[in-house]
Image (spheres, rainbow, N blue to C red):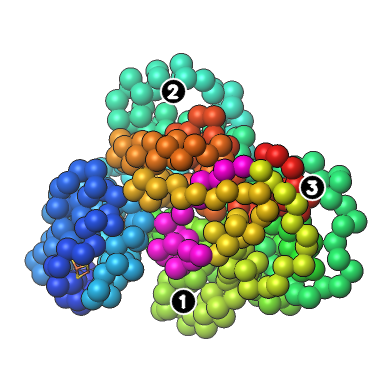
Amino acid sequence: MTVEIGDSKRLELLVSACVHCGFCLPACPTYAITKDECDSPRGRILLLGEAARSGVVAPSVRRHIDRCIGCEACVPVCPSGVRYDQMLSIARRLVNKKRSISDRMWRAALLKVLPYPERMRPLKRLATLLSGSVSVRLLRQMGPFGSKLAALLLQGWVAGDLGRQADASHREGRSPSETRGRVALVSGCIAATYFQGVTQDARFVLEQEGIAVSVPEGQGCCGALSAHAGETEQAAGFARRMIDAFAPGDFDAILVTAAGCGAEMKRYPELLENDPAYSERAAGLAGRVMDISEYLCAIDPIAPRGRLVARVAYHEACHLAWAQGIRSEPRRLLNGIPGLEVVESGGLGCCGSGGLYALEEVELADEIGVRKRDAVLATGAAVVASGNPGCSIQLAKILEGVEVIHPVSLLARSLEQGGSL
Ligand code: SF4
Ligand code: SF4
């Protein structure tokens, strides 16, 4: 398969910034597991450089690009400012043309269902119906495709119990009389199916802080899942829909509770740079997108925090830390809750989730997950806080007996009443 001239030139330019120093290797979770240079950022860059020069994507390139989680931990540690994230977007698009028919069908099916809440809900019911280790074990015995189905079933099953809506009856009538800001909330796709409770908690916290909240109609998926899968056109379609949905709004910021969605929406200007009808509007929207933790740290807190007594391990989502550079804010939010002991969750950093990654590269995702599980259990924390739905599902899958919760939901509990978790 050949590389188109435009992609080839762009790749060559991006690759040429790498001086092969290897400073990025210790940051890479896949290299930490396989110890194969081709599963490191430097190795992948060399493979892509060769593809750009020769104009041919060898089958082995697809294998090593597929094994990249897209965590972007290699980007901020690079002293030469290499934009591996941009290379990866091109590479994923290229290797998609190299897939087998069955592989394409599986990915197409996932992308026809997962970004659409109305299609996800029946799947959620099916996952609940088939829940149980027997079904998962049976599927795993059916080869690689069975393993992927088992991973999907397990994700749907564990996610079913996460982010559920709280009893909100005792929250009514508690907002301050004065409004000091206006924001719009992103409701998401997976979040609209499984994490409505997080959106509800975000709304409660913001209103307690004197912020008026709207959830614009007509939103859909932000496009992150499609972009991670290299389906740029589908991602661009979702982006245009989001821009239209948020266009008429009279608000100061667009708040996101899912790290992956925030990272993707901040990239809309890159995604739509060649679309004259949307490029300017994409920049306008991206400039107003903030993670909920970013926004809450930027305003002076006025809502009294109640005491929550617990040790909480903070899991740093890659798409919050590396893709958006948001590191201190979620920690500050958690440390602002009286009684909470906040510890780091450790491991390789990444949990192995990565969009469709845990459904595609099941074995490697599980191995990365095991490192994370052991590190979290070693902290002795009863609760792990994560600001990304994909990470939360992966963490719930690997951690038995540990509650997984969004930082804003912990804050909502604190504002609500305090007490022991
Ligand atoms: S990507 Fe950056 S850190 Fe990694 S080898 Fe290249 S120059 Fe060095
Ligand atoms: S994006 Fe993550 S997994 Fe991929 S090369 Fe960079 S550090 Fe490794």
Q: In the image, is residue 325 part of the stretch drawn in magenta?
A: yes
**Ligand 2 is within 8 Å of the C-beta of the residue at disc 1:** no
Question: Which quadrant is home to the N terminus?
Answer: bottom left
Residue 54: image quadrant is bottom left
Judging by the rendered image, the residue that carries numbered circle 1 is 269
Q: Secondary structure at mark 1?
A: helix
In front: mark 1 or mark 3? 3
Which range of residues does the magenta coloring cover?
A: 310-328
Which three-letter amino acid code belongs to the residue tagged 2?
A: Val
Question: Which quadrant is home to the C terminus?
Answer: top right
Find ligand 1 in the image and state its quadrant. bottom left
Count of number-bearing discs = 3
Is residue 93 found left or right of 318 in the rendered image? left
The residue at the point 78 percent across, 50 percent down is: 416
Residue 102: image quadrant is top left
Mark sitting earlier along the chain (1/3) = 1
Judging by the rendered image, the residue that carries numbered circle 2 is 136
Whole-percent x and y of residue 39?
20, 51
Which three-letter amino acid code belongs to the residue tagged 3?
A: Gln
Mark sitting earlier along the chain (3/2) = 2
The residue at the point 72 percent across, 68 percent down is: 301
The residue at the point 39 percent across, 40 percent down is: 375
The residue at the point 42 percent across, 65 percent down is: 323
Judging by the rendered image, the residue that carries numbered circle 3 is 417
Q: Nearer the viewer, residue 249 or 118?
A: 249
Q: CA distance from mark 3 to mark 2?
A: 39 Å
